[in-house]
Image: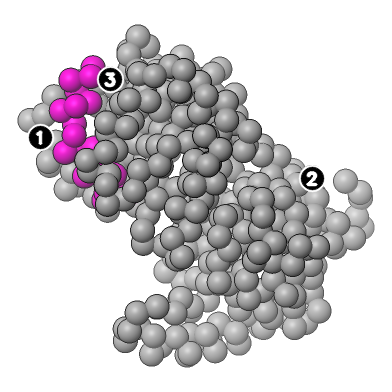
Amino acid sequence: MTERKRPYRVIISGGGTGGHVYPAIAIANKMKEFFPDTQFLFVGAKGKMEMEKVPEAGYDIEGLWISGFQRKLTFKNLAFPFKLMSSLIKARKIINRFKPDIAVGVGGFASGPILHAAARKGIPTLLQEQNSYAGITNKLLAKSASKICVAYENMDKYFPKEKIVLTGNPVRTDIIDMEQKREAALRFFRLDPKKKTILSVGGSLGARTINESIIKNLDQIIAADVQLIWQIGSIYYKEFQERLIGLDLRNIRHYEFLKEMDLAYAAADVVISRAGALSISEICLCGKPAVFVPSPNVAEDHQTKNAMALVNENAALMVKDNEAEINLVPEALKVLFNEGQRETLSQNIKSFARPHAAENIVKEIIGIIG
């Protein structure tokens, strides 16, 4: 990396979900490693998780009054033109005031107005697309972007081929070298090292289908004498805590939210998860056999496309959302006790890992700024 006379000024915009927010923070953190005096401004959507998580990470953020256009008929769409106009006006003011060297979009509604405003001012833009299916915001912004950093092959069906750089998705670095943490992880969760362990996660908010599949088949898990680390999620935790009263929970560790995800991955022999881009990137990096349950409630069913990119290479297993209550736990138990299959899945999923994604994206940013 080259020296620079004045600090870089970088806007990072997007969010709405952890799959957008955490890669954005990872990019900023990595750039800070190389250029500690870089000045950042994040721009998110008011009321979304980035307005809380970004300040927690130590960065300034401004919120736009913006949300997506609903695909079904709803009164919420009546406010969309006003939200869009308000956000475009505020985005122009932010660009004029902050004067960034580059604007980085990580997906989500807020990245649309801010990158549009930056491009109109002649400020270079970079997109980071986490999924195997491009979101509508990034597809609209691609024409004016200098570079588009992607996590999957064959993204030229959505973006200009000459702009695409295969970088992978930035993730937390503490999930590298999982084997070295296994003993500490088993102690932390008070688990028996002689027993096999399933990790079930459905995101910070939780996943109803995964939670129902676990609780309705808990007898199978108990009968198999395996251990379960279960992140229920903030939306469902109170309800499921009550439903667990009176059950045999000696081998069950259930939580509202797991801050120690590195230890959870280290302790796990098999992971059950939704198929969001961030979850997949983390599981690839730690090389764990996984059973994915794609959420059906996402744009263009992109989680199924994410999962199938791995399933087609024998790097993961997938259970459809509407079949999960019957098939998910049996499928997880089957692979848990098949050492050969676990080893194959583990080796194959590691080939999708890109541990230097954040660094590669920062190099692209610096290359654009010059």
The tag on residue 34 is 2
- Colour mapping: one colour
Which kind of residue does numbered mark 3 sit on?
Val
Magenta segment boundaries in residue numbering: 206-226
Q: CA distance from mark 3 to mark 1?
A: 19 Å
Label 1: few (<14), some (14–19) or many (≥20) C-alpha neighbours in 10 Å: few
Q: Position of residue 218 (x, y in %)?
A: 18, 31
Residue furthest to the front in view is 312
Classified by dominant secondary structure, the portion drawn in magenta counts as helix
Which kind of residue does numbered mark 1 sit on?
Ile
| Residue corresponding to mark 3 | 226
* Viewer-proximal residue among 301 and 89: 301
Residue furthest to the left in view is 246
Q: Residue at x 40, y 33 (%)?
A: 271
Q: Residue at x 63, y 33 (%)?
A: 351
* Viewer-proximal residue among 293 and 355: 293
- In terms of image quadrants, where is residue 211? top left
| Residue corresponding to mark 1 | 245
- Whether the magenta-drawn stretch holds residue 360 is answered as no
Report the side of 167 relative to 186 (left or right): right
Report the side of 335 relative to 38 (left or right): left
Q: Secondary structure at mark 3?
A: loop
Q: Secondary structure at mark 2?
A: helix
Specify which label sits upstream in the sequence, 2 or 1. 2
Q: Secondary structure at mark 1?
A: loop
Specify which label sits upstream in the sequence, 3 or 2. 2
> Which label sits in the foreground, 3 or 1?
3
Q: Position of residue 107 (x, y in %)?
A: 57, 64
Q: Give the total of numbered labels.
A: 3
Label 2: few (<14), some (14–19) or many (≥20) C-alpha neighbours in 10 Å: some
Which kind of residue does numbered mark 2 sit on?
Phe
